[in-house]
Image (cartoon, helix red, strand yellow):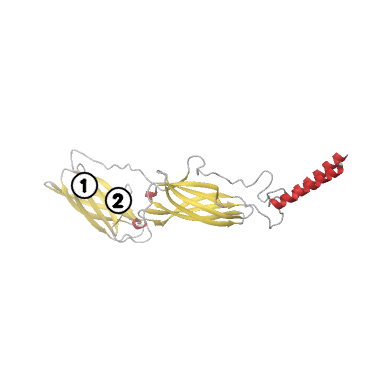
Amino acid sequence: MNRDAALAGAAVGVTALALLAVVAVPGVLADPTEDGPVRPGPVDIAETNIGYDESAVRGETVTLGVETRVRHRGNPTPNVTLLVRAVDADSGLVETTRTVDVGTLRDDGETVVATNVTVERAGGYRIETVLFQDERRVDGTGKTVRGLEALTPTYARSTVAFSDRAALPPLSVSVADAAGNRTTLDLAASLTNGGDAPSEDLAVTFVLRQADSNVVATRATSDVDAIRPGRTATTTATATVPTEYNYYLDAVLTRDGVVVDTARTAVNLDPTKRISVNETEEEVEFRVEDFESGDGDGVERETEFETEAGTATSQPGFGPVAAVVALAAAALLARRRHR
């Protein structure tokens, strides 16, 4: 067979194979026009913030507001969804789950996605946020909230509380009369209105309990007159108890039957023994913190959309340049063999 004819036939065969690949495998030759396939731009979670509205704090539950900032770059990215779940920090059980359809992200920058999750007002939770694109997990993060029991329900919130100053203690007790084995006490409670409106519907209940037996010796209730904003007022009551015993005095401040504050002190009537109130209390406060272990989210990250040879706008396949190079290589090879 003539060598030139063989080489020419080989070049024709390469060209035919390239054309056949274009027909058989869509996308082998990339379409440089805007109508061709475009790879979605990368998306990830830039930041997550957790807060609450005071009106969303109820007796058993609290609704937390989760604000997630989703960052997007490059080409439009469709079918973006965000999963938000609350996991009990102690048991590891999922308390609640919310899914938000973010839709298509087109502009470069951050998009704020707001979600509400309702949990029990006790203990702590891991609030996890997971980002999906076309049902594929691409990023995740989370924070831990603790001390939910420290949040005051709306119905128990009041601007009036027992005073807490060295010169003006919340409770004071004095002996009004002592006859035989009975002692009459004058009880007083100091209250301060730290709000902007006068108080109303307040009452203080005094409860005296014998220290050794914890038996309630007596109780008395006193209505509280309206207290102007920023003012401190005193409400009083009298109580008669057996002499030569020590007592704990508990005062309960209520508004329309709802407990809004409490105070305690000791009353020593036993000359041979004294008691005091244990003032060491564990302070519980609401706080939000990042996860402490690993990346803090336990979520596999898949945010690398770019490759070493191209950017997020590069197309799959050989491309027209690759086809031309293949044909040129075949022609050069034929020429060298002919020589």
Any part of residue 109 in sight? yes
Which residue is label 2 attached to?
262
Which residue position holds label 1?
209
Residue 294: where, in percent of width, then height? 51, 39
Residue 34 image-quadrant placement: bottom right
Residue 210 horizontal/vertical position (percent): 20, 45
Residue at the location (25% across, 52% down)? 188
Q: Percent x, y for residue 227?
A: 32, 59
Residue at 26% across, 46% down? 265
Residue at 75 percent of width and 51 percent of height: 19
Q: Is residue 62 above or below residue 291?
A: below
In the image, farthest residue toward the top:
272
In terms of sequence position, does the residue under pointer 2 or pointer 1 come before the other?
1
Q: Which amino acid type is shown beneath numbered disc 2?
A: Thr
Drawn side of residue 241 relative to residue 149, left or right: left
Q: Is residue 57 left or right of residue 302?
A: left
Q: Residue furthest right?
A: 339
**Local SS, label 2:** strand
